[in-house]
């Protein structure tokens, strides 16, 4: 196989959608597996759709996810520039080549004339069946043509598609895709108005010049592939044509239809890797990073949307993904976007993190709340609550009672667990706790349980009321771990408050 060189070629028309991120990831995995190169090319020839900040966003998102770029915008490389708007001069000569060979032609039809035609002819398509009725270099005399060119009337260059021919696209995922050329219109390849090529021409020229070996992209580009195959043929580059692989769509969580930003808004999950502030509308869209996802979890989650290693293993590091990834095993059908599964991945990755790292991350949250605590204590707290958390942001909910006494008591729990004899029981417990010098969790447990046994108290009655007094509700880690951390004074004070506050 020739050197693997793949590219991620987004258009900077907005924030990178999560589907685009998966495309970038699959390109990256494939490149790394084959010891090849991953390129980032910015396809910005459509100035009307350009959005400020989109390019920076794309670069930042890839960096966050650990998808490193070997060549491209932001990195540089032997084929620089990698931003198509800066490659204007490169494309023109190929346009001229196609014109000289009669494989493309110049067309002067104005948008109004084209619209008029569309109104007149049902399903109008600019192609072999209609091009001779239009205003182009095939219908104008040489004198007329030169006259218009001299007057600098705006024109476009269109590809001239031979009708009724089978075009075959060999796709590594879908196999042979056969399309009849009659369904393809004479697409615009270049515009005199800005001297820029359209997506199709720029894409092919650059893939060729940058020696791209595999084009791995979303399914939405499959309809363009036959035209691209033709362009390779017209430009005489058939022998170096890259191999195609069109990835399945990401589908809505409920199944049918393409995953959209609206699904995310409706169901409350991000569809973008990073938060995005729309420069025009000032509308903010949430991102996986800001929602507290770990980049490794997002990568793992996305990698399995449309591909699996063929084993039960679901937790896969970037290294393992690189090792196991297989383009031929990518599914043909769409992958349902299961957001809950995304949370599950984050939960799993959170468990894998060291308590030291988690404590460090949590300390930032606490600092904002103005809560100071020792590192050692925080490490212990985090070790007790991480199993119940998907995100660092869940830590507060799971551990607030370590830092502050309850301000209210869960009503249902009170009704069920706080009986007329409870205050006396809790007062007795206070006496027991007061006598304990060694406030370690194990010693506390041993002593309190010995007292319960000796007095033949009901274990549930004591422990539930105890928890209610300390936590405010019936949740949280092991009781003796909690009180060992908050200490004797705080434990007794909370018990006294509960006795006073909870009316029977
Ligand atoms: N510029 C196209 C996009 O925005 C690239 C498609 C391709 O990879 O060929 O996705």
Image: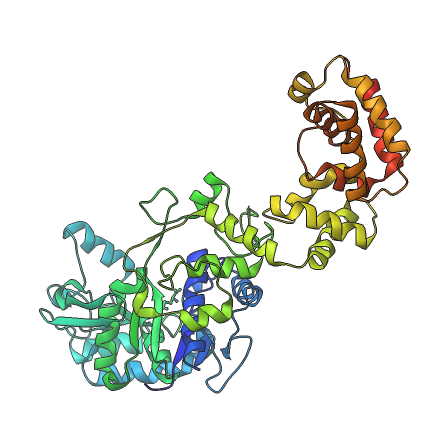
219 horizontally vs 13: left or right: left
Residue 479 image position (x, y, % from top left): 73, 36
Q: Which quarter of the figure has residue 357?
A: bottom right
Q: Quadrant of ligand 1?
A: bottom left
Which residue reaches farthest front?
A: 454
Of residues 236 and 242, the one nearer the viewer is 242
Looking at the picture, the colour scheme in use is rainbow
Residue 286 image position (x, y, % from top left): 55, 48
Residue 497 image position (x, y, % from top left): 84, 24
439 horizontally vs 105: left or right: right
Q: Residue at x 32, y 59 (%)?
A: 248
151 horizontally vs 303: left or right: left
**Residue 75 makes an appearance in the image:** yes
Can you say whether 29 is above or below 122 in the image?
Answer: below
175 horizontally vs 482: left or right: left
Can you say whether 112 is above or below 451 in the image?
Answer: below
Can you say whether 367 is above or below 170 in the image?
Answer: above
Of residues 433 and 411, the one nearer the viewer is 433
Q: Residue at x 69, y 55 (%)?
A: 358
Quadrant including the N terminus: bottom left
Q: Residue at x 50, y 45 (%)?
A: 269
Q: Which quarter of the figure has residue 492?
A: top right
Residue 25 image position (x, y, % from top left): 45, 66
């Amino acid at each position: 196989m020739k050197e693997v060189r793949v590219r991620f070629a987004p258009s900077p028309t907005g924030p990178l959608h999560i589907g685009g991120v998966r495309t970038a990831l699959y390109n990256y995995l494939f490149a790394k597996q084959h010891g090849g190169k991953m390129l980032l090319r910015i396809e910005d020839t459509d100035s009307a759709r350009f959005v400020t900040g989109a390019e920076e966003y794309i670069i930042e998102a890839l960096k966050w996810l650990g998808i490193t770029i070997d060549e491209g915008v932001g990195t540089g490389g032997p084929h620089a520039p990698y931003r198509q708007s800066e490659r204007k001069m490169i494309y023109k000569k190929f346009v001229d080549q196609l014109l000289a060979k009669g494989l493309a032609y110049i067309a002067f039809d104005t948008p109004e004339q084209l619209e008029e035609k569309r109104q007149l002819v049902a399903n109008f398509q600019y192609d072999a069946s209609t091009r001779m009725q239009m205003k182009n270099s095939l219908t104008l005399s040489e004198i007329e043509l030169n006259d218009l060119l001299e007057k600098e009337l705006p024109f476009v260059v269109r590809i001239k598609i031979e009708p009724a021919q089978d075009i075959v696209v060999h796709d590594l995922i879908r196999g042979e895709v056969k399309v009849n050329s009659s369904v393809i219109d004479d697409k615009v390849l270049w515009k005199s108005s800005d001297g820029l090529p359209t997506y199709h021409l720029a894409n092919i020229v650059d893939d060729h010049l940058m020696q791209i070996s595999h084009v791995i992209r979303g399914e939405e580009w499959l309809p363009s592939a036959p035209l691209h195959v033709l362009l390779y043929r017209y430009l005489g580059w058939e022998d170096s044509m890259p191999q195609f692989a069109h990835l399945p769509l990401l589908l809505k969580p409920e199944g049918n239809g393409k995953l959209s930003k609206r699904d995310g808004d409706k169901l409350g999950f991000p569809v973008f890797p990073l938060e995005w502030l729309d420069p025009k509308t000032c509308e903010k869209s949430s991102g996986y990073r800001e929602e507290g996802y770990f980049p490794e979890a997002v990568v793992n989650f996305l990698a399995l949307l449309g591909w699996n290693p063929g084993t039960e293993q679901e937790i896969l590091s970037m290294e393992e993904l690189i090792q196991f990834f297989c383009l031929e095993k990518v599914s043909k059908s769409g992958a349902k976007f299961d957001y809950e599964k995304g949370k599950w991945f984050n939960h799993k990755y959170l468990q894998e993190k060291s308590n030291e790292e988690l404590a460090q991350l949590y300390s930032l949250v606490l600092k904002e709340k103005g809560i100071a605590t020792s590192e050692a204590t925080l490490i212990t707290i985090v070790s007790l609550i991480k199993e119940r958390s998907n995100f660092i942001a869940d830590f507060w909910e799971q551990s607030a009672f370590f830092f502050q006494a309850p301000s209210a008591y869960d009503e249902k729990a009170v009704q069920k667990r706080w009986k007329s004899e409870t205050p006396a029981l809790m007062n007795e417990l206070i006496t027991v706790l007061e006598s304990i010098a060694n406030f370690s969790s194990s010693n506390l447990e041993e002593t309190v349980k010995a007292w319960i046994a000796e007095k033949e108290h009901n274990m549930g009655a004591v422990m539930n009321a105890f928890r209610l007094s300390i936590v405010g509700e019936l949740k949280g880690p092991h009781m003796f771990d909690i009180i060992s951390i908050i200490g004797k004074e705080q434990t007794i004070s909370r018990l006294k408050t509960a006795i006073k506050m909870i009316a029977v």
